[in-house]
Amino acid sequence: GTGKLQYFFYVWNKTMMMLISPPLSKRSTILAYCLATKSINHRVASFSSSHYPVASALKDPSLLGDLTVSDVDTAFDVIDPGASAGELSDGSAVIGRVGLMGRDDAKAAIDKASMALKGWRDGTTALQRSSILSKWSSLIKENSEDIAKIMTMESGKPLHESRGEVNYGTSFLDYYAGEAIRPNAAGGGFLSPTPFTHPGTSAPRGKIMAVYEAVGVCALITPWNFPIAMITRKAGPALAAGCTTVLKPSELTPLTAVALETLAKRAGVPDGVFEVITADKGLTREVGDEFCTNPIVKKISFTGSTPVGKLLMKLSSDTMKRLSLELGGNAAFIVFQDADIDQAVDAAMASKFRNAGQTCVCADRFIIHKSVEDEFVTKLAGKVKQISVGHGLKKGITMGPVITSDAVDNLKEKVEEAIAQGAKCVIGGSPLTNLGPNYFEPTILTNTKESDLVWCTENFGPIVAIKTFETEEEALALANNSPVGLASYFCTKDLSRSFRFSSSLESGIVGLNEGIVSTATAPFGGVKESGLGREGSIVGMNEYMETKYVFMNV
């Protein structure tokens, strides 16, 4: 049809331009415009902007699969969120095309994971699974620069942050490779003294034994803001426990997942143990529905918004699945009058502006003691002015775009509403349209109200909303006045207050004098409407195991 003909000439013209211009190699030129086959029916094409072609930017383009013929009717675009308006308009912001997969593909992947379960759970030792996880981690590290570039090109975060995420992501594989062989892992357990006695005597009878076993087939659903870490934080403990997995990554950042799957295969992860389903926005709902309603799936682990988490919980109720839900946040950041203000500012910068404020544990609500507000705002504004905004692949950039133009519109509306209600904009407050439609200025607002949307809803953007307090009780009430409770932060030198206030905060994670606290060795998760379960640490391993009680009358 007309669409296919137009597409043919688009590819032809692009390829000819590449062929007659130096200095790309023939291999890189071809790779930049070919599709790659992945498990089941993946097709990945590295169609990229003239400035940042995916395949030609990689040392190992085969991370995106083996070459095959393009089929544009069964693929969807992956867009560079850092692209300019012109690049988005002329189509050069498309950095890749990924196979379009729906319910039937999800069901096939689940069936494949089910068939692989016995061999992985019962046919491998914990030490063998540990070795494979370690090998997978090593391969990711060996390809760290390629993985970082893919992440930056599809998520927008600066390259230095992507490099840091590679280290963070592999730390989960390393950690759970170690946990796999411990007595409290799958195949381990404990013995308890028996309360039973032999008839007519006081002699103990039998043994009480508890054994940890893999849950079974697990469905993993991950967001776009941490394209590698959210995958390894789920797949690491699942595979260590002997579970098989089917992953549905965000439609905005599927290329990182495809590369991870390639490296998993190279590390020796058997077919069916780690399957990837790539679906666009239109097919995501039916894939999620298959995950929730298929009785083969025994557990779902989801990181994303609270409304979607609630929907998954409802859909999973008929089959009584185990759930891990890491949902939305609206973190409070409290600065007491005795705090080290320089330390507090550094913590605020780390918590707020990482990934352009697009993390679920980013500080949103800044609750500052009235006596130190001026000092805190002045020093914070000085730091914010040093932020360099631009495309994440450019040298010296410290903050990239937000993920979509809709996100920009949402931030703009919130800032305008707050100002209309009496807030003062100290710095920023507007879209950076000269860079592209997805950029927004780092922003500081003072005198915000609890009713302002910028205060009472999660922003997922580079906005600091400030409100003052005078007493500890007032600060606690402000911090806890939220339906969600993922993370909170506060700064103080008072040791008594440190214990008292942290125990009173209604959140699953608390950072004291620190803005970044996530690590593979600590449990991560929230309370209230921020979700269920924990990821990271041995607690995260427990999420993928059932406990079987065996009484042995021997």
Image: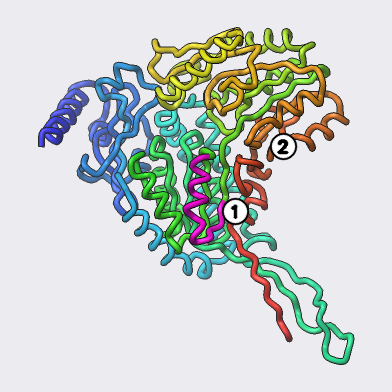
Choose mark 2 or mark 1, whichever is in front.
2
| Prevalent SS, magenta region | helix
Which numbered dot is residue 163? Answer: none
Query: Alpha-carbon neighbours of circle 2 within 10 Å: few (<14), some, or many (≥20)?
Result: many
Residue 383 position (above or below residue 314): above
Q: Residue beneath label 1, please?
A: 177
Amino acid type, mark 2: Glu
For the residue pair 417 and 536, the one nearer the viewer reads as 417
Q: Which of 146 and 333 is in front in this view?
A: 333
Q: Are marks 2 and 1 in contact (CB under 8 Å)?
A: no
From which residue to which does the magenta span run? 307-323
Residue under label 2:
506
Location of residue 92 by image quarter: top left
Q: Is residue 231 left or right of residue 516?
A: left
Q: Position of residue 515 (x, y in %)?
A: 67, 27
Marks 2 and 1 sit apart, C-alpha to C-alpha, by: 32 Å
Q: Is residue 424 left or right of residue 63?
A: right
Residue 319 lies in magenta, yes or no?
yes
Q: Does the magenta stretch include residue 132?
A: no
Say which residue appears at 50% left-offset and 31% top-offset. Answer: 162
Q: How many labels does the image show?
A: 2
Q: Which residue is drawn at 55% across and 55% down?
A: 238
Q: In which quarter of the image is the C terminus?
A: bottom right
Q: Determine the image quadrant of residue 99.
A: top left
Residue 30: x and y in percent read: 23, 35
Say which amino acid is labelled 1.
Answer: Ala
Q: Where is residue 525 in the image (x, y as percent from the top left)?
A: 63, 43
Looking at the image, residue 365 lies above or below residue 428 = below
Q: Is residue 243 visible?
A: yes
Question: Label 2's element?
Answer: loop
Q: Where is residue 250 in the image (x, y as percent from the top left)?
A: 42, 40
